Image (spheres, grey):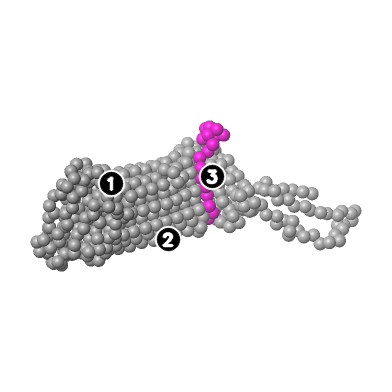
Amino acid sequence: MFWSSVGGPRCVCLLRCLSSRRLAKPERPLQTSRLLSVPASPNHPVRRWALEVGPFSSVRAQLACSISVHPLDPHTFPGADRAVVTVHGAQEPGPEDLSVRYDDQSKELLICAQQGGSGLSIDLAAPINSNLFITARGEARVHVSKMECDTCRVHTEEGDCVLQSVKGHQIEVRSAGGHFTGVGTIHGNVDVSLRGDGSVDARKLQGARMSVSTERGAIKVKAIYAESSRVSSSSGRIHLGHVHGEASVENVSGASVVDGSNGFLKICSAGGDVDVYVGDGGAADIQTQEGERCVCARPGLAGSWRGAARGGGASRPRGCSAENRRETSPKPDHGSGVFERRICGGPLGQRPEPQRLRQAEDAELAREPQAGASPVTPGAWSPDRSQLRLDFLSNICGVKHVWVEGKRG
């Protein structure tokens, strides 16, 4: 006789030779192990649940396998009152390895998977506004797409997390070694914290508050629209595209690059390179001890920058051409000092306001400089220049603090 499991196209053939008295001994021994071990496709569903859930419910998952979460099909489930859990794998897990149930009292869909082998994975179709609380162990990965919820909280160990076009009030991602990828626009107050070599690669973050941090992993975000943002790393490279609103960038030894800032930008770097472009209405407060520095401001902006000559480091022009004016500062003759420079747009040949040298109030400076010890070479430029560069060249012993504030003149 033949039977097939519900989960997949596995077929077992049992052969019996019957007689009136006893079973006939087969001429060749049956290879039952081969017949019983026909594997299913790793992507084939082996079990499925369709549970009735209440409105504004939550999903709480403790998993040792990967999971993918997406909204219900509104045409198939117009009432959005179902949660469909589909298990994929080579073999069906036992009840001790996987449990799925809905708690009416707490309005939570509880998923617990103790087994992570045999290519096991879970696909969850839930109401679009379901809150998500997902914890993945080992190398289990989490993929959430197109959900709109108040809270989306994902914690992984070594597995990666992918959020695709997710909208929420609070979005939190934690990982001990996995990577985070943001596809499309992530709406909400985003809080991403990765340890180890975990890196961040996101297209667009939009919300009131943003916080992104890594240890050694790189951070790359093409656009941030937020009232306040904080991006930090110990040694990973930070590359931000367009930043809108108040932003703070902290990096111990990695490079920090900001392609464009239209708000207040503060950068603190101990030893990494800094490359910043300040746009219309932007302001920048840059503190650095070592590494190369390049600060660019658009023409027609009025503002100032100041720095403390201290320590080592050099600067480089970032694709500097003859059309760009360069501000240089020679090495101070007497100790370290703080210098300030005003930059403003004007007619061709008009010089900026005279530079002023101020004594350092910072206790870190060993002694106060003499008057004129750290002059800044004045230069003239016209408003038709493509951009104004403030390049701190190798003849200065280092810049600890730079201030750039821009506004339309």
Amino acid type, mark 3: Leu
Are the two marked residues, 3 and 2, in contact with CB atoms closer than 8 angstroms?
no
- Dot 3, how many residues are within 10 Å of its Cα: few (below 14), some (14-19), or many (20+)? many
Q: Is residue 211 above or below residue 128?
A: below
Q: Nearer the viewer, mark 1 or mark 2?
A: 1
In this picture, which residue range is highlighted in magenta?
A: 61-80
Looking at this view, is 52 or 368 the one in front?
368
Asked whether residue 202 is drawn in magenta, I would say no
Seen as rendered, the residue at the extreme right is 20
**What is the crowding at mark 2: few (fewer than 14 residues within 10 Å), some, or many (at least 20)?**
some
| In the foreground, 172 or 333 | 333
**Drawn side of residue 297 relative to residue 254, left or right:** left
The answer to whether residue 73 is seen in the rendering is yes
The residue depicted at 17 percent of the width and 47 percent of the height is: 349
Residue 92, position in %: x, y? 63, 52
Give amino acid for label 2: Asp
Residue 101, image quadrant = top right
Q: Earlier in the sequence, mark 1 or mark 3?
A: 3
Where residue 71 appears, as percent x and y from the top left, is 50, 40
Marks 3, 2: nearer the viewer: 2
Could you tell me if the residues under marks 1 and 2 are in contact, i.e. CB atoms within 8 Å?
A: no
Q: Residue at x 49, y 50 (%)?
A: 142
What residue did someone put label 1 on?
A: 386
Identified by mark 1, the residue type is Ser
Q: CA distance from mark 3 to mark 2?
A: 29 Å
Residue 124's label in the rendered image is 3
Position of 302 relative to 399 (above/below): above
In the picture of the structure, the residue carrying the numbered disc 2 is: 197
